[in-house]
Amino acid sequence: MGFVRGPSSPTIQGFRRMVSLRVLGLAWLGAALAIGCANGNRPTDPQPVPYRIGPSDELVIRVLPDPAIEREVIVQPDGSFAFDLIGKVQAAQRTPAEVAAEIEERIAEYRVSPSVTVSLQRASSSSVTVIGEVDEPGIYPVERDLRISDVIARAGGATIYAAASRVRLIRREGEQAFTYLADLDEIHKGRLDTDYVVLRGDLIYVPPAATVGAGYHMLRFLYPLEVLARILLAPFTSVIGPAGT
C-alpha cells in the first residue's frame, strides 16, 4: 500500500494566510512604535487638528445673501477648483474655513456683504490604515468626524481574537510618531473618551489577546520546522503505485 500526498487543508491554508497578514501588520506596528519611542514622551490625548483639503476632495460651497449660490466642486489634481465670478481657487493643504475666507474676500467685488461657507462633502484624498485583529484589514477613506469605532466597523469589526481594550491609534505629527490607546469595550458601553477622531495617515492597530499572540509566535517558530519536515519526507509522501505493478 503506497503513501499519497494530498493537498494542504483549506482551513490550514487560510490560517497561514491570516498569520502572514498578522506578521506583516506586527512588523509595521513595530516600526511605528520604534519611531515613537525614539522621539520621547507622547501627549495623553491627540490634539484636534483641522482637516486640510486635498486633490479629489468634494466640497459644497454656499454664498449668501440671496440670490444664493451653491456649488459642488471637486478639487483638481493641482489642488484647485473653479468658482463662479472669481475663477480659480487654490484649496490644497488649506482648511475649509481658510478657503471660505478667500472666496468671501474675492467675491465681495461682485456681491454686497457676502457670507461664504465651505463644507467637506467627501474626503477622497484622505485615508487611514487598519491592521491586526479585524475582519478586513486595509486602507479606508477618512471623512470629517470619522472616529476609531467608525473605521473599525468599516473594517468588519474586531475579531473574537482581539484585545479590544488595547486598540492603538498611531499618528505622525511632524517628525514624531505618537501612540494613543483606545478601549473598544468601553466605547461599546457608551464611554466615548477614547473614541478619537481619526486623521489622514493614521494607523489603527487592533492587537490580539495575550493567549492568541502567544499562539502566533509559536506558529512563527514552528513554521520553519514544518517546511524542513516536508522536504525530508517528500520522497516518502510521493504517490507510489500498488504493490506488484
Image: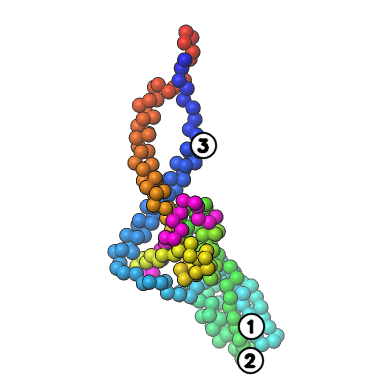
Above or below — where is 26 with respect to 6?
Answer: below
Q: Which residue is mark 3?
A: 10
Say which of marks 3 and 2 sits in front.
3
Query: What's drawn in magenta, residue-wise?
Result: 155-175
Q: CA distance from mark 3 to mark 2?
A: 70 Å
Residue 156 in the magenta stretch? The answer is: yes
Residue 93 position, x and y percent, is 48, 73
Badge 2: residue crowd in 10 Å (few <14, some 14–19, many ≥20): few
Q: Which residue is mark 1?
A: 63
Residue 71 position, x and y percent, is 65, 75
Q: CA distance from mark 1 to mark 2?
A: 11 Å
Type of the residue with mark 1: Val
Above or below — where is 245 with respect to 29?
Answer: above
Camera-nearest residue between 136 and 98: 136
Q: How is the image coloured?
A: rainbow
Judged from the image, the secondary structure of the residue bearing numbered disc 3 is: helix
In the rendered view, does 132 fall on the left or right side of 59?
left
Residue 157 position, x and y percent, is 53, 56
Above or below — where is 200 with respect to 227?
Answer: below
Numbered badge on residue 120 = none
Residue found at the far bottom of this picture: 112
* Residue 75: quadrant of the picture: bottom right
Q: Which residue is mark 2?
A: 112
Badge 3: residue crowd in 10 Å (few <14, some 14–19, many ≥20): few
Q: CA distance from mark 1 to mark 3?
A: 59 Å
**Which badge, 3 or 2, is on the more N-terminal residue?**
3
Judged from the image, the secondary structure of the residue bearing numbered disc 2 is: loop
| Residue at 51% across, 59% down | 152
| Residue at 64% across, 89% down | 111
Type of the residue with mark 2: Val
Residue 90 position, x and y percent, is 52, 75
Say which of marks 1 and 2 sits in front.
1
